Image (tube, rainbow, N blue to C red):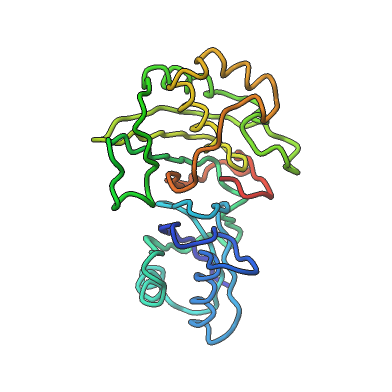
Amino acid sequence: MPRFKCIISYDGAGFFGYQVQARGRTVQGELERVLTEIHKGKRTRVTASGRTDARVHAVGQVIHFDTDYSIPAERWPVVLNQKLPDDIVVMNVEEADPDFHARFQTSGKEYRYVIDRGEFPTPFRRHYAVHHPVTIDLALMREAARHFVGEHDFTSFSVAKSAVVDRVRTIEYFDIIEQGSEWIFIVKGNGFLYNMVRIMVGTLLEVGSGKYTPADIPEMLKAKNRSAAGKTAPPHGLYLWKVEYGERGKGKVSEEIVE
């Protein structure tokens, strides 16, 4: 049975997260509803590279599904987008190897987090950027972000109540760029724990405001205690930007929501 790999984008504002749940609208629920309709009632499941939390967005989420329909890969985006709601778009579809797995074969991910630095919040960005107009030192945040790069135990930067035992992850790149009135935090790594990006961003914002110093980051990492790090930034500024696939088993996979 052919397996198809899809790159999808979605606006997380109207979802209770990616994964199907008992109540609330989800990205997976919408995808499986449409695929099941296309397959004339036959339940068709999708598997994603990871689960995003409520209000978190995706530009380059990756999913796979199996089908016995002989629809060519280039036609699937048209077929799916005609039936999907406007806040989910299938950007690309290609036929994958039968053993391809969207989740277990990830080798890395890129996340971006958007801060609106304007004096007043704009209503058009209220679901897509976090308004943070207070005085803050960008240079200090950039200096602090460099301490996250490398292989570390990120226990202090994940939720305290977690079943994950191995919390060692490798961050390959972390920087903050200015784009108009917005600051964009860009982080790339081989895997992420639940709320890890949001806690790192929240902590960096507190470094920029003077509550912490860049030198505090290594001490937070060593503490391996959630209470040692800063606040968790809100979900709506976070974007799953890109998922990479390379050497099998290179990435770190968790049973939890990883964003």
Taking depth in this image into account, of 41 and 112 the one nearest to the observer is: 112
Task: Looking at the picture, tell me which residue is in the foreground, 221 or 149.
Answer: 221
Q: Is residue 28 left or right of residue 110?
A: right
Q: Quadrant of residue 28?
A: bottom right
Q: Residue at x 31, y 34 (%)?
A: 117
Task: Check the image and name the residue furthest to the top.
Answer: 215
Q: Position of residue 158 (x, y in %)?
A: 64, 36
Q: Please provide percent x and percent y for residue 235.
A: 49, 46
Q: Quadrant of the N terminus?
A: bottom right
Identify whether 35 is placed above or below 46.
Answer: below
Residue 132 x, y percent position in the rendering: 38, 35
Relative height, residue 185 to residue 25 (above, below):
above
Residue 103 versus residue 216: which sits nearer the camera?
216
Q: Residue at x 43, y 77 (%)?
A: 71
Residue nearer the viewer, 96 or 256? 256
**Does residue 135 lie above or below 162 as drawn?**
above
Left/right placement of residue 108 relative to residue 94 reads right
- Give percent across and percent down for residue 80: 41, 73
Left or right for 133, reference 156: left
Seen at 56% across and 23% down, the residue is: 150
